[in-house]
């Protein structure tokens, strides 16, 4: 189990902040060598977008998710 906090300087929306946190956590898990992860979030919008198959669901945050 892991947890962390990270300051964000400028965030255009709460959803963007949730996606940034998700991206950071996934990169951390990859770099730490985790073979599987469980992601939990209280952001219904982010969870809904993760469940969608449509590419456009992430179009507004493409710069965040492409790293």
Image (tube, rainbow, N blue to C red):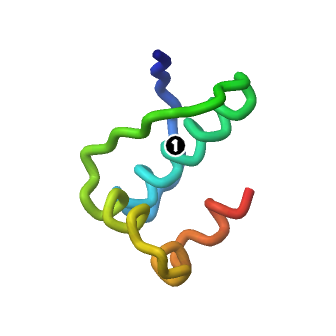
Q: State the residue in front, 15 or 58.
A: 58
Whether residue 29 is situated above or below residue 1 in the rendered picture: below
- Looking at the image, which residue is at 51% across and 83% down? 56
- Looking at the image, which residue is at 52% across and 31% down? 6
Q: Quadrant of the C terminus?
A: bottom right
- Looking at the image, which residue is at 34% across and 57% down? 47
Give the residue furthest to the front. 35
Whether residue 14 is situated above or below residue 38 in the rendered picture: below
Whether residue 4 is situated above or below residue 27 in the rendered picture: above
The residue beneath circle 1 is 8
Is 31 placed left or right of 62 in the picture?
right
- Looking at the image, which residue is at 58% across and 47% down? 23
Give coordinates of residue 41: x percent, y percent. 32, 43
Q: How many residues crowd around disc 1 within 10 Å: few (fewer than 14), some, or many (20 or more)? A: few
Give coordinates of residue 44: x percent, y percent. 25, 58
Is 49 placed left or right of 34 in the picture?
left
Q: State the residue in front, 6 or 50.
A: 50
Q: Where on the picture, by quarter, is residue 50?
A: bottom left
Is 7 placed left or right of 50 in the picture?
right
Give the residue furthest to the top. 1
Q: Where on the picture, by quarter, is residue 16?
A: bottom left
Q: Secondary structure at mark 1?
A: loop
Give coordinates of residue 14: x percent, y percent. 34, 56
Is 14 placed left or right of 50 in the picture?
left
Whether residue 53 is situated above or below residue 16 in the rendered picture: below
Q: How many marks?
A: 1
Give coordinates of residue 21: x percent, y percent. 49, 43
């Amino acid at each position: 189990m892991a947890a962390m906090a990270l300051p964000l300087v400028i965030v255009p929306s709460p959803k963007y902040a949730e996606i940034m946190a998700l991206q950071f956590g996934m990169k951390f898990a990859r770099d730490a060598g985790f073979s599987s992860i469980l992601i939990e979030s209280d952001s219904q919008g982010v969870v809904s977008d993760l469940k969608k198959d449509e590419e456009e669901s992430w179009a507004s945050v493409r710069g965040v998710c492409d790293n």
